[in-house]
Amino acid sequence: MRRVSIALLIFGVLVALMAPAALAASPHFISASASGPNASGSLTVPFKIAGLGANETITVTATADATAVYACQNNAGNFPNAANKQQVSGPVSDSGQFTSGKNGQITGSLTLSPPPSTLNCPSGQHAVLASVSYTNVQISATGVGAESIPGTFSRTFFNV
């Protein structure tokens, strides 16, 4: 009877010691969302990852398909020629390295920027971002997987 009790005690201690390792072996996203675009047209992608070991560094990447419209604006704030605008579309991304705390979690955010413009405006005018839209927003992390963030995130600054 005493041997069985000792064996059960040893088994219980081993299970208790292995539990944190088992939890650390299943990294996953707790949350992922997007907010914006802000006044500069950027989209913020906050996230939280759990199930990592303590002080683990991983690379996290946010991606999206973006469309931006740029237009030539004069110093009076007008858009004198409707032909002076450009639509730019393409994939955008941002990556960063994040390190988990002793609790095995990471809370962070990445920022997606509109695709750049090559619009050349005539003298007395300058290019401005008229509108921007992000779709197919996704966040992924090495060894964690990926999360899609549903929706279209858009903002119109000027009707051109």
Image (tube, helix red, strand yellow):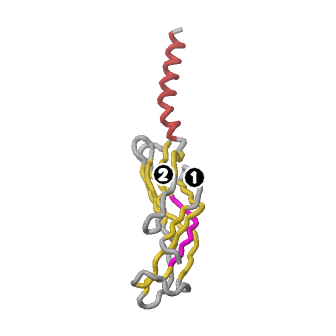
Residue 64: within the magenta? yes
Amino acid type, mark 1 = Glu
Mark 1 vs 2: CB contact within 8 A: yes
Quarter of the image where the N terminus is located? top right
**Residue at 48% across, 48% down:** 48
Segment tinted magenta in the rendering: 61-70
Q: What residue is disc 2 on?
A: 47
**Image coordinates for residue 157, horizontal then vertical, percent:** 48, 71
Camera sees residue 95? no
Helix, strand, or loop for circle 1? strand
Q: Is residue 149 magenta?
A: no
Rendered position, 100 above or below 38:
above
Main SS of the magenta part reads strand
Answer with the quarter of the image where residue 102 lies.
top left
Seen at 50% across and 40% down, the residue is 24
Q: Earlier in the sequence, mark 1 or mark 2?
A: 2
Q: x and y percent of residue 23 in the render?
A: 51, 37
Q: In which quarter of the image is residue 28?
A: top right
Which SS class for mark 2? strand
| Crowd class of label 2 (few under 14; some 14 to 19; many from 20; radius 10 Å) | many
Report the Cα–Cα distance between label 1 and label 2: 10 Å
Q: Residue at the far bottom: name it.
A: 123
Which of these two is toward me, 122 or 81?
81
